[in-house]
Every structure is written in C-alpha cells, then in structure tokens.
Image (cartoon, rainbow, N blue to C red):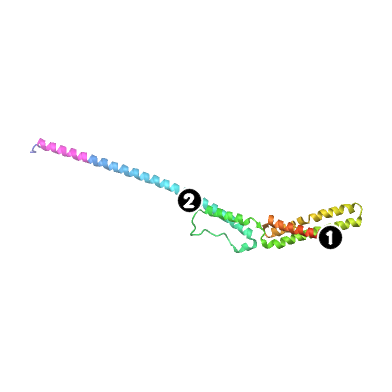
Amino acid sequence: MNEPVASDTYAAHVRRLAELTGRVATQRAEAQAWYDQQCAAAERAVAEADEQLRRAEAELAEARSLADRVDAEVTHLWAELRGRLGLGARRLGPPPGPARDATGDPVDALRTVRDLLDRAGQPGELPGSANPLLALCGVAGALLAYALGVGARAVGARYGGDLAVGMPVLALVVTLLGPLAGLAPAKRLADRRHALLGPRPAAIVLVAGLATTVTLLVAAR
C-alpha cells in the first residue's frame, strides 16, 4: 500500500516547482530580450550598411562625373595647345594620362593650366631687337609718302590748270602723313611675330618717319 505523503514534503515540492517555473520564465524572458536586442542590432547594422552603400554609390557616381569632366577638359586643353604649336605639335602625341603621384584637386590644376594657356596666348609687345626694323618701317613709309608727293606735284606741273593748284596741296598732305604710313608695315611685322604694336614700337615708327619727312622737306628747299 502507498504511504501518504507528508504535508510538509508536498509543500516543499510545490515551492520547488514554483521556483523552477519562475526561473524558467525569467530565463525565457532574458533569452527573448537578448534575441530582440540582437534582431534590433542586426536591423540597425543592415540599415547602416544600406546607407553606406548609397553614399558610396553617390560618391562613385560623382567621381565618375568628375573624371569625365576632367578628361574632357584635358582633351580640350591639349587640342588648344596643339593648335597653338602648329606643326611642332605632331611630336606631342595623345593627351597625357593622370600621374600616379598626383595630389590635390584636378579642377584647380586644370584651372591653372587654362590660365597659363590664356596668358601664353596673349601677344606681348615687340622686343627691343625689333627696333631697327621698326625704324626702317618709319623711314620707308616717309620715303614712300614723299615720293607720292613728288609725283603729285609733277602731275600738277605737267598738266597745269586746276591740277597745278590742287596737286601741290595734295602732295603736301600726303608728305605730312608719311610718318603714319610706316605703321602699316610695322603692324604686319608685329602680327607675323604674334606681338602687339604697342605705344613704344609705334613711337619708334613715328619718330623715324617724322625725322625722315623733316629731313626730306629741308633738303628739298
């Protein structure tokens, strides 16, 4: 026959069962909380990874766009340089690629190159070595104008009438404009040397032409 269980023993088992049940519930709650935390952390990590991926894709697209703009500007500047060098540009070949040790913003570097090309493309004033040629232009212009004046006076003296009155006046005007006539060949000289006919070269031409004109007028008296 089964012996009856003492009430104190039964109560102890009930308390033990209650303790175990509570402990299991606590551990289960802790496990669920840990699981929820891990899921939330994983979701945050995935969201951060997606955001980093979007930023990386945007930076990549911007870098590609910048590279395309830089390549286009390099090609344009290279073509402009070849055009300015003319026949000597055949040895240049294709545009150079990016340097491996290059640092800094390529846009700033290209802007500097553009400024250099712009300054190089601006013609400067004729050098001092061209002064004899400038003086010769002034002398030649004055001689030509004086010769035209002499011819005009000769025509007036030959045909008489109104020409005898008007041609000497025209001859004087042409002769006095002789110093200015030298500016035309001087301008062509400057253009051939890709330079400007500035105030100094123009003054040399005018002074030489004026001196020649005065000398011829004095000698003709």
The residue segment tinted magenta is 6-23
Closer to us: 179 or 51: 179
Quarter of the picture containing the C terminus is bottom right
Residue 32, compared with residue 145, is above or below; it is above
Q: Quadrant of residue 90?
A: bottom right
Mark 2 neighbour density, 10 Å: few (under 14) some (14–19) many (20 or more): few
**Residue at the farthest top position:** 7
Reading the image, the residue beneath label 1 is: 220
Please tell me the numbered disc located at residue 60.
2
Would residue 101 be found to the left or right of residue 21 on screen? right
Our reading of the magenta stretch's main secondary structure is helix
Please tell me the numbered disc located at residue 207.
none
Please state the horizontal and vertical placement of residue 110, each as a whole percent of the image.
55, 54
Q: Quadrant of residue 137?
A: bottom right
Q: Residue at x 88, y 57 (%)?
A: 155
Mark 1 / mark 2, whichever is N-terminal: 2
Q: Amino acid at mark 2?
A: Leu
Would residue 116 be found to the left or right of residue 46 on screen? right
Q: Residue at x 91, y 56 (%)?
A: 159
Please state the horizontal and vertical placement of residue 17, each as a whole percent of the image.
17, 39
